[in-house]
Image (cartoon, grey):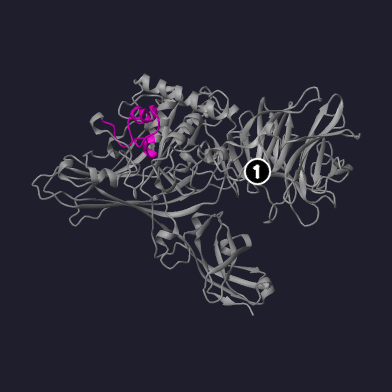
Amino acid sequence: MKRRFFSVFGIVLLAAAGQAAPAASKPRPLIGESEHVFVLAPDNTDVRGLAFDEISPVAPRLFVLDKNGKVFVYRAPGSGNPNAKTFDLLATAALPPGPDGKPLRSPRGLAFAREEGADVLYYLNWNGAGESENSQLWRWKLGTTSVRHYDLSLYPYRVGNREVLALAFSNGKFFIAYDASNYKDGVLRVQRGILLLQADRTRNGDPAFVRHLPDSGKSPSLGLAVMDWDGARYLWSTVGAEAVYCADETTGRGIFHFDRPMTAAKEWTCRGLAFGQDGLWVPESAEGPDLLHRVNVTKNLEVFPEGPRILRHLIMTIESTPEGEHPDAGTAYHYYSRPYSYGQLFNQGIWPETEKVADLSAKPLGRIKPFTYDPAGDVASRQHMSLVEYPSGPAASYSSRYEIDLWTNPFREYIYPHRADRKAEALKGLNYLADDPELFNLADRQTYDELFARVRKHIEAKYGAPADLENPYWAARNVLEYYLDNYYYPSRPKQVPAAVDYGRAHYDANPGNLKIELSAKDYDKTQIIACSGTSVMLAGAMRYLGISARWLGTGTEQGPDVWDKNKNGFLDADETAPCTSGHRYTQVWLGGRYGWVCFDATPTKPDDDDYDVPPPLKSQWMYMNRAAAGHLKDKRIVFNIGSGLFRPLYRDFEYDEELALENNCGGDQRYNLQGKFDKPELWKLARNRIEVRNICFIENVKAEGPKEKTTVTWSLGGAWDKDTEAKVMIAVQKIAAGTGAVAGTKVLARGIAPGAGQAVVDLKDYSGSDVRLRVYKEGDAETGGATSVFRLD
């Protein structure tokens, strides 16, 4: 089983060596991409709600509500020209007035239903500031004057005077989004945001409150839609105007998100979502009539988008120093892990011909030995290692270095849980279910059984639904949420290290059963673990359920605040960016369609490092970014796939209280490099360093010509031939007079071939201002160059 991933510019197929192959055609659109953009009727502006009708005899129809209470009825495309840019407008109608005979103050949200042979529209109204605040749900039987409204501000609906925003209706259930941002209780904020009501089947009574569902927990939802598709039901919602996300319809649990579709960088004032014709309909504000995107959410489901490459030169060093003089300090070893290639993990590539390993010691004695190992017997995940071995002899200091060129790129995964399964034919003969007593200790049945009892109780209390531990996605998601909601991450400033009990062989990262045991009681300060611990805990829990799991060991380039000496934001030729010492998270096997998928159960730190406060419930936004979403950071370099304990990368253990605090983020087993010794008592803990340098540069950026047609020129330096699909973009920065601070940045042009060396931009809007132009690589803002500040007279 091999999953398919595609770059944003074309398919990137890489050979085992990591080299780029010619681009080929690829299936489009991917999930989250616009299939088509339609222009609404000339006076259809300021969209406030969408509804799709695939039920009635006159179907399919699309209903669009504007802010003035006018409903536009369109014939949805399908039977006509699929390439049309406009809809056929069938009719328009004004919403009936309120009881006082006046138009509704602020209508929004729209839902269609076919009830007792009649077409019905449901919509909302918000009476906001300036008068008694209240929200209403309206029912209008089309073609008649029959209207009815329900006061959602009344106590039985548990919304109060909060603003209602969006509406969906399906199978007798109302989903109503409201602004939950003003809940003072943080737990209530992340548990609420969508109101679930049950319609009265007789139409004579009020809809009944069922429960609150969570929204994203980041920004209120501006649109809702129910998707009944492929035998499963999902709820679509928005993260304010920023993103669109898919959630479980029963519980509101967010699953994945993507950026909202846009044709221009404008503020999104439209509201509403609708699902129909196997597509998600998303409005966009525009000059004149608004636009409507038909977004793909049902095609090319196992093909995930990738972003542009970030090219770097990786350098890793190990230094080992003896505790003192000794005639025979034993053999010393420096182990290095080669980063994985594209064909194995899809988010990065390497150029093996650039790999170098060197002994830098004052008296070089190291013998360089390449070797490989296969985690869980998996040849497809083979790890390539380099060993620098120093022979036994008098104690001496040793230093070695590893180098290679690589690239990383962002990619995101979109998992529909109902499509995950336990099919594991592709893993036949491998032991990703095997126990490792030093890491998992699956024989401790009591601890694991008690864990899952707590998980079931925790999830049912949060969502009012049983915890699914059969479906591999939901099993991993439920355990991940339990960990995030019950543990904290260590803190160096507070000297709060990962919890250990060395008397029980309970180390920073393992075994998983002893880390899990921490949550067997009410919260206390022993529930402190880091990524190494949670990766083992989640992998062990999945294996106990019979679901294959492993972990990834990674590193990440640190940001410009660490290395940017001249404060220009670019990783220049004379600058080196240090990398984090490592991060570890879990991959869970989600079956024949999805394969290995990342889950990151690493806890967060408490607010103000206050470890006295139990961990709060997290937002759906966090869960969506931690569960089956790809790598949490786009510059993640994957060095290691872990199944069982791998001795060459395991730390020579010698307990020291000071070292325990210094190494408080856990990590008995490293992921990329490690110094080892036959006689560890004679050596200090080896020092390791990981860093990257840039290998592509944009130089000599200049601007000439009139403001309306300013020509920007540049030259290239470095290895641009290693990224034939690279594009550059040009941005203008307005510089505040006197202070030199950046007062604003705007992108003027994008999608330019780097080798073009020039482009024309329009700067007339910046007349009389001090500005600077920046030319930089798309997807890698740290690769670029800039003009000096100049004034546009």
Left/right placement of residue 543 relative to residue 716 reads: left
Left/right placement of residue 322 relative to residue 413 reads: left
Q: Is residue 507 magenta?
A: yes
| Residue type pointed to by label 1 | Asp
Q: Nearer the viewer, residue 382 or 550?
A: 550
Residue 81 versus residue 588 in the image, above or below: below
Q: Residue furthest bottom?
A: 793
Q: Is residue 174 magenta?
A: no
Residue 4, horizontal then vertical, whole percent: 56, 38
Callout 1: 10 Å neighbours few (<14), some, many (20+)?
many
What quarter of the picture does the C terminus occupy?
bottom right
* Residue 76 in view (yes/no): no
Q: Nearer the viewer, residue 769 or 489?
A: 489
Residue 61, horizontal then vertical, whole percent: 83, 36
Q: Residue furthest left?
A: 327
Quadrant in the rendering for residue 97: top right
Q: Which residue is mark 1?
A: 179
First to last magenta residue range: 505-533
Q: Residue furthest right?
A: 144
* Residue 3 in view (yes/no): yes
Quadrant in the rendering for residue 363: bottom left
Quadrant in the rendering for residue 27: top right
Query: Tag 1, which secondary structure?
Result: loop
Q: Residue at x 61, y 30 (%)?
A: 251
Residue 89, horizontal then vertical, whole percent: 87, 43
Residue 408 versus residue 562 in the image, above or below: above
